[in-house]
Amino acid sequence: MGSAPEIKDSTVEDRREYIKKRFPCIADCDMCGLCKVFHGKDAETAYADYISGDRSFAEVSADYK
Protein backbone atom coordinates (compact mmCIF):
# COMPACT_ATOMS: atom_id res chain seq x y z
CA MET A 1 0.00 0.00 0.00
CA GLY A 2 1.39 3.37 -1.00
CA SER A 3 1.39 6.48 1.10
CA ALA A 4 -1.76 8.43 1.83
CA PRO A 5 -2.90 10.78 -0.92
CA GLU A 6 -2.03 14.41 -0.25
CA ILE A 7 -5.10 16.54 0.36
CA LYS A 8 -4.17 19.06 -2.33
CA ASP A 9 -3.73 16.30 -4.94
CA SER A 10 -6.78 14.15 -4.21
CA THR A 11 -10.55 14.17 -3.94
CA VAL A 12 -12.70 13.25 -0.98
CA GLU A 13 -13.47 9.94 -2.69
CA ASP A 14 -9.76 9.23 -3.28
CA ARG A 15 -9.06 9.72 0.43
CA ARG A 16 -12.11 7.70 1.53
CA GLU A 17 -11.08 4.81 -0.71
CA TYR A 18 -7.53 4.93 0.66
CA ILE A 19 -8.81 4.69 4.26
CA LYS A 20 -11.14 1.81 3.36
CA LYS A 21 -8.29 -0.11 1.73
CA ARG A 22 -5.70 0.74 4.40
CA PHE A 23 -7.95 -0.22 7.33
CA PRO A 24 -10.41 -2.85 6.05
CA CYS A 25 -13.10 -3.98 8.45
CA ILE A 26 -13.09 -7.76 8.70
CA ALA A 27 -16.13 -7.80 11.02
CA ASP A 28 -14.27 -9.67 13.75
CA CYS A 29 -13.18 -7.07 16.30
CA ASP A 30 -11.59 -9.65 18.58
CA MET A 31 -9.29 -10.69 15.74
CA CYS A 32 -8.57 -7.34 14.10
CA GLY A 33 -8.50 -4.76 16.87
CA LEU A 34 -8.81 -1.66 14.65
CA CYS A 35 -11.94 -0.44 16.44
CA LYS A 36 -10.02 -0.61 19.71
CA VAL A 37 -7.16 1.43 18.24
CA PHE A 38 -9.68 4.01 17.00
CA HIS A 39 -11.45 4.16 20.40
CA GLY A 40 -14.58 2.35 19.25
CA LYS A 41 -14.86 4.13 15.89
CA ASP A 42 -14.55 2.63 12.46
CA ALA A 43 -11.62 3.90 10.37
CA GLU A 44 -13.77 6.09 8.14
CA THR A 45 -15.18 7.90 11.18
CA ALA A 46 -11.77 8.15 12.85
CA TYR A 47 -10.25 9.68 9.72
CA ALA A 48 -13.21 11.93 8.85
CA ASP A 49 -11.07 15.09 9.16
CA TYR A 50 -8.54 13.66 6.70
CA ILE A 51 -11.22 12.46 4.29
CA SER A 52 -12.90 15.88 4.32
CA GLY A 53 -9.54 17.61 3.80
CA ASP A 54 -9.43 19.43 7.14
CA ARG A 55 -6.32 17.68 8.54
CA SER A 56 -3.51 15.61 7.05
CA PHE A 57 -3.33 11.84 7.36
CA ALA A 58 -0.31 12.21 9.67
CA GLU A 59 -2.16 14.67 11.96
CA VAL A 60 -5.13 12.36 12.36
CA SER A 61 -2.87 9.33 12.82
CA ALA A 62 -1.09 11.11 15.66
CA ASP A 63 -4.40 11.19 17.57
CA TYR A 64 -4.30 7.37 17.77
CA LYS A 65 -0.68 6.77 18.73
Image: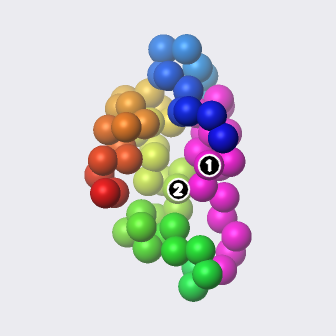
Direction from residue 6 to residue 2 in the image, left or right: right
Mark 2 or mark 1: whose residue is earlier in sequence = 1
Q: Secondary structure at mark 1?
A: helix
- Label 2 sits on residue: 43
Direction from residue 26 to residue 31 in the image, left or right: left
Q: Is residue 55 magenta?
A: no
Residue 15 x/y as whole percent: 58, 33
* Vertical comparison of 57 with 41: above or below: above
Residue 60 x/y as whole percent: 36, 43
Decide which of 32, 14 is in the foreground and name it: 32
The residue carrying pointer 2 sits among few (fewer than 14), some (14 to 19) or many (20 or more) residues within 10 Å by Cα, namely some
Quarter of the figure that contains the C terminus: bottom left
The residue carrying pointer 1 sits among few (fewer than 14), some (14 to 19) or many (20 or more) residues within 10 Å by Cα, namely some
Identify which residue is drawn at 46% across, 44% down. Answer: 48
Q: Residue furthest bottom?
A: 30
Q: Which SS type dominates the magenta stretch?
A: helix
* Vertical comparison of 19 with 9: above or below: below
Identify which residue is drawn at 48% across, 22% down. Answer: 7
Amino acid type of the residue that numbered disc 1 sits on in the rendered structure: Arg
Identify which residue is drawn at 62% across, 34% down. Answer: 2
- Label 1 sits on residue: 22
Decide which of 44, 18 is in the foreground and name it: 18
Q: Secondary structure at mark 2?
A: helix
Direction from residue 63 to residue 52 in the image, left or right: right
* Tag count: 2
Does any portion of residue 40 appear in the rendered image? no
Highlighted magenta segment, given as a residue range: 13-28
Residue 24 x/y as whole percent: 66, 58
Cα separation between marks 2 and 1: 9 Å
Amino acid type of the residue that numbered disc 2 sits on in the rendered structure: Ala
